[in-house]
Image (tube, rainbow, N blue to C red):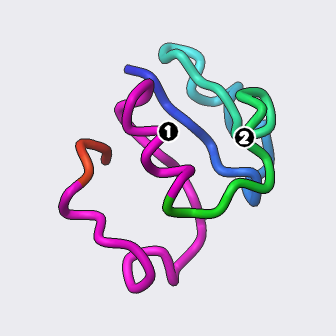
Amino acid sequence: MNILIDECIDRRLARQLSFHEVKTVPQMGWAGIKDGELLRLAEIEFDVFITVDRNLPFQQNLTVLDLA
């Protein structure tokens, strides 16, 4: 499973997910990209996006994305 960790989450979480392919937003060179574009990019390469942004479901239409 390919997992993307948002830049607002401690990157050390990746160590706990060692059985998966894990990248952080900064590792991908996507730091500072707005949520809508970030989600579209993530959808192409990742299966899961981990964030603590509670407003994301209210700001973006997550139902159209093929991303958990």
**Of the pair 28 and 50, the residue shown nearer to us:** 28
Q: Is residue 12 left or right of residue 67?
A: right
Residue at image point 47% right, 51% down:
39
On the image, the x and y values in percent for residue 14 come to 68, 30
Q: Which residue is mark 2?
A: 30
Looking at the picture, does residue 14 appear above or below residue 52?
above
Q: Is residue 29 left or right of residue 5?
A: right
Given the image, on which type of amino acid does mark 2 rest?
Trp
Residue at image point 79% right, 56% down:
32
Q: Which residue is mark 1?
A: 41
The answer for how far apart the CA atoms under marks 2 and 1 are is 9 Å
Image label count: 2
Say what secondary structure mark 1 lies in. helix
Looking at the picture, does residue 39 appear above or below residue 17?
below
Residue at image point 49% right, 39% down:
41
Q: Is residue 30 left or right of residue 65?
A: right
Magenta highlight range: 37-64
Given the image, on which type of amino acid does mark 1 rest?
Leu
**Of the pair 60 and 47, the residue shown nearer to us:** 60
On the image, the x and y values in percent for residue 44 come to 39, 29
On the image, the x and y values in percent for residue 33 come to 70, 54
First in sequence: mark 2 or mark 1? Answer: 2
Dividing the picture into quarters, in which one does residue 9 lie?
bottom right
Looking at the picture, does residue 23 appear above or below residue 32?
above
Say what secondary structure mark 2 lies in. loop
Q: Are marks 2 and 1 in contact (CB under 8 Å)?
A: yes
Dividing the picture into quarters, in which one does residue 8 lie?
bottom right
